[in-house]
Image (cartoon, rainbow, N blue to C red):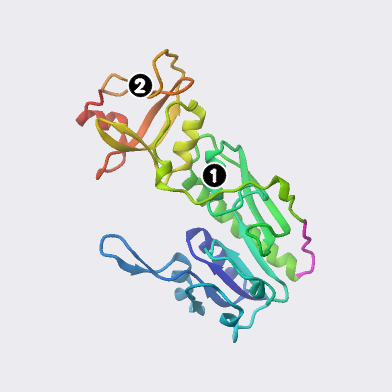
Amino acid sequence: MKIVFMGTPEFALKSLARLYADGHEITGVFTQADKPRNRGMKLSYSPVKEFALEKNLPIFQPEGKLSADIFSGIEFDLITVVAYGKLLPVNVLALPRFGCVNIHASLLPKFRGAAPIQHAVLSGEKETGVTSMYMAEKMDAGDIIFTEKTPIGEHETSGDLFSRLSILGAELLSKTVREIEAGRANRTPQNHAEATYAPMLKKEMSPIDWSCSSKQISCKIRGLNPWPMATMELSGKSVKILTAEISDTKTELPPGQIITDNRTKLEVVTGDGTVCIKLLQAPGGKAMSAADYMRGNRVV
């Protein structure tokens, strides 16, 4: 099948690579414009563009809003979209004879939007997955083709889940394209009344509110990892908390109070118990265990 692929980050790369490995003819790869990164602000390519260059696939990086004119001269039967970063207007959705298909990293209609993986962890969900759907004018509201479910591990971070779901999403896209080509793909309308939303994360979300429950704080630490990371004040510094565990300590101390021996134990009182800080990162420093941090820093 002749396919236009639209995607940008590492999550989308797995899907493009799978379509290529499946033998489909990729007639166009659309990805976001090159962006300056790191201290030198050198322009860098998206993971999807890197792959397209390696395989000598046609690359398109339109700026601004998309229009049907951009696709003139490209032959395709299907458009597949995985974390592209732009909405497709109605006149583009109508172009391919098999429609436009999207892979979304949630069990729709839950967690529509830009950050479904992180919000699933933040919300304390025990299960998530990926959904393939026919795209519609409204964001993530199209008819569902297939879903694949997976449990969320007790200690799994958003970063961990990203890696697993990118592979699951690639497998689901492969299956979806195969079933569309064979004429066996069904479509199930979403129940829009059950829709929830997952907006982009912001750095303002980072500070931990210790009056929340230990479970909520654990979900926040895992959900904001690897970006923007949960933070706490420690020795007058805003420190990133990479991992923590809910402990069995019972105390009448107020939320936010630190319990420590300044050697190996670093616990913080929550709204209903305590959490034990395991891995942290001070400003300008590298990630280290709480014990290593306390060897050079007195916390109380």
Q: Is residue 118 left or right of residue 287?
A: right
Callout 1: SS: helix
- Residue drawn at x 22%, y 26% is 298
Principal secondary structure, stretch drawn in magenta = loop
Residue 37 found in image quarter: bottom left
Q: Amino acid at mark 1?
A: His
When the figure is inspected, residue 13 is found, relative to residue 152, above or below; the finding is: below
Q: Nearer the viewer, residue 17 or 191?
A: 191
Q: Position of residue 56 (x, y in %)?
A: 48, 79
When the figure is inspected, residue 91 is found, relative to residue 169, above or below; the finding is: below
Q: Position of residue 250 (x, y in %)?
A: 45, 14
Magenta region: which residues?
182-188
Disc on res. 257:
2
Q: Amino acid at mark 2?
A: Gln
Q: Is residue 207 left or right of residue 196?
A: left
Q: Nearer the viewer, residue 20 or 80?
A: 80
**Label 1 vs 2, first from the N-terminus:** 1
- Residue drawn at x 53%, y 62% is 12
Q: Is residue 155 left or right of residue 92?
A: left
Q: Position of residue 275 (x, y in %)?
A: 42, 25
Based on the picture, tell me whether residue 186 belongs to the magenta stretch. yes
Q: Nearer the viewer, residue 113 or 15?
A: 113
Give the quarter of the figure containing the N terminus: bottom right
| Residue 167 shows up from this direction | yes
When the figure is inspected, residue 50 is found, relative to residue 38, above or below; the finding is: below
When the figure is inspected, residue 217 is found, relative to residue 129, above or below; the finding is: above
Per the image, the residue denoted by label 1 is: 119
Alpha-carbon neighbours of circle 2 within 10 Å: few (<14), some, or many (≥20)? some
Q: CA distance from mark 1 to mark 2?
A: 27 Å
Based on the picture, tell me whether residue 146 belongs to the magenta stretch. no
